Image: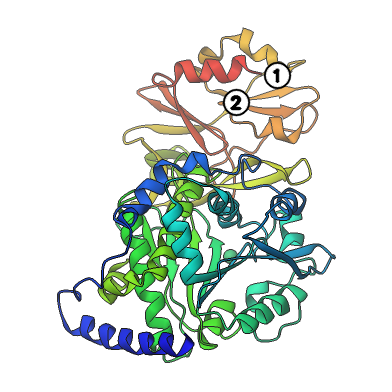
Amino acid sequence: MRHLFFVLCFLTVVACENSHSQTNPKPAAPAAKSALSGDLHRQLYDKYNLYRETSIKDRRFKHADIVPLVQKLKAPFRTQKAGKSMEGRDIYQVQIGNGPVQVLLWSQMHGDEASATMAIMDIFNFMTRDDQFNPLRERLMKELTLTFIPLLNPDGAERFKRRNAIDIDLNRDAARLQTPEAQLLKRVRDELKADWGFNLHDQNRYYSAGKGKTATFSFLAPAYNYAKEVNAVRGNAMHLIGVMNNILQEYIPGQVGRYSDSFEPRAFGDNIQKWGTSTILIECGGLAEDPDKQEIRRLHFAMLVAALDAIATQTYKSVGMDVYESIPFNGSNEFFDLLVREVEIDFKGEYYTVDIGFRKDEISYNGNRDYYYRAQIADIGDLSIFHAYESVDALGMQAFPGKTYATTLSSASQLASLDPIKLLQEGYTDVFVTGLSSKARFATLPFRLIEAGKGKENNNVRMSGNPSLYIQKDGETRYVVVNGAAYDLERDRDKILKLVNKL
Ligand SMILES: [Zn+2]
């Protein structure tokens, strides 16, 4: 069957060359064998909750949460320990299917990039069920051998950080192979002689996909040499990315980006492509109102299963190379969490019009299981070409550093009795409270609570600062900004009272 595969690769190259020179892509390859395949991704998306692994609720799970989910898998799954991390955590390899086409999927080689691991746990559940998707399952298992390595960097996940236990970036260890995690990945790829490789990551939420849209998913068929040539192996990856792009456009139009294909000789994607595996990099970015990436997880699930089916049915060949090439390149640093636009700030009695761009860092606590946000000004000045998850149009308004309330409160709950709306109208954003945690200090709240005795916040509007602001029009406070979030004192009145009453 490997011989057949190479013949197919050759045919694909011919198709690629054609699609470069024609405006219309090649007509579709033979239709898939099941009625399911028409709108398969939509059916998977709609039925997703039947398969969602409910024990994994957000991105901050750990090795100990994943191990029982892997260990409980029964036939037709084949599960084995593939090796250990530097700190001795078991890394598992999970196989299903007996088909001639070898597909390898590995997730979370960067410990804080968890979206795909969640989707893989959902795929495991999906494959164990007995329902209307049985023809699809049978096809996948007959045509493909699927090998999953979920959570390749468990030591990094433990700390919710990118690198492994000795701070090596596993994705720069593909050539030198110093870490056991990288050695394991290379060995499994070589043993399988994988035909396909899915290199599953997350990117930061500030990438854009052109035209002011966030890059919720980004793809790359990595180059295998500095000349960025396209052979059959890489060409197949481009076709399959076209399939996945077409799926995503139905749910998140315009929110798909593509990485530039500069060759990185130390990275796994580039090397695995070079070693003869059609390799696809998938990066999950940001999506509005999905901070824990649960909607992204759902999309990932539907897209991955549909992509595997496109491999099984070979329908990926019918999506022309022009689709891959039409995906806009990722723009970096073009997005903010909050942009306060065209606001006037004072310097020695003169007003200057600026845009203020805030971004938020995740600060871990509770053993890295939880986090709060700490905002900072990431840019200031003319930011008119940039975009944000939340924007405040402050044209003709003035921003002032928030004032500190004169009385120290004995508990945060006292705030509710102080008429919070009136306080904010008067510009009081910062409040001293005795006995506060850092978490409370950066709570999602239109007030900054400061532990008494720890000094006043610096509310100057300067780079890297995190000022509380009140923003006025004609002397009336219209907005406050606290910890990188804006509150409209008219529109958000109920929300503000609710937040304060919860304290
Ligand atoms: Zn990554």
* Relative depth, front residue between 426 and 94: 94
- Check disc 2 and give the amino acid type: Phe
* Relative depth, front residue between 483 and 287: 287
Image quarter for ligand 1: bottom right
Q: Is residue 82 above or below residue 285?
A: below
Q: Which mark is residue 447?
A: 2
Mark 1 → mark 2, Cα distance in angstroms: 10 Å
Q: Decide if residue 28 is on the left or right side of residue 59.
A: left
User: Which residue is painted at 67% across and 76% down in the image?
Assistant: 185
User: Which residue is painted at 55% across and 26% down in the image?
Assistant: 446
**Given the current orientation, which residue lies at the most extreme left position?**
23
Question: Label 1's element?
Answer: helix
> Which quadrant is the C terminus positioned in?
top right
Q: Is residue 485 above or below residue 13?
A: above
Q: Which residue is mark 1?
A: 412
- Check disc 1 and give the amino acid type: Ala
Q: Is residue 275 above or below residue 204?
A: below
User: Which residue is painted at 41% across and 48% down in the image?
Assistant: 44
> Where is residue 33 drawn, in percent x and y?
32, 63
Corner quadrant of residue 403: top right
Question: Label 2's element?
Answer: loop
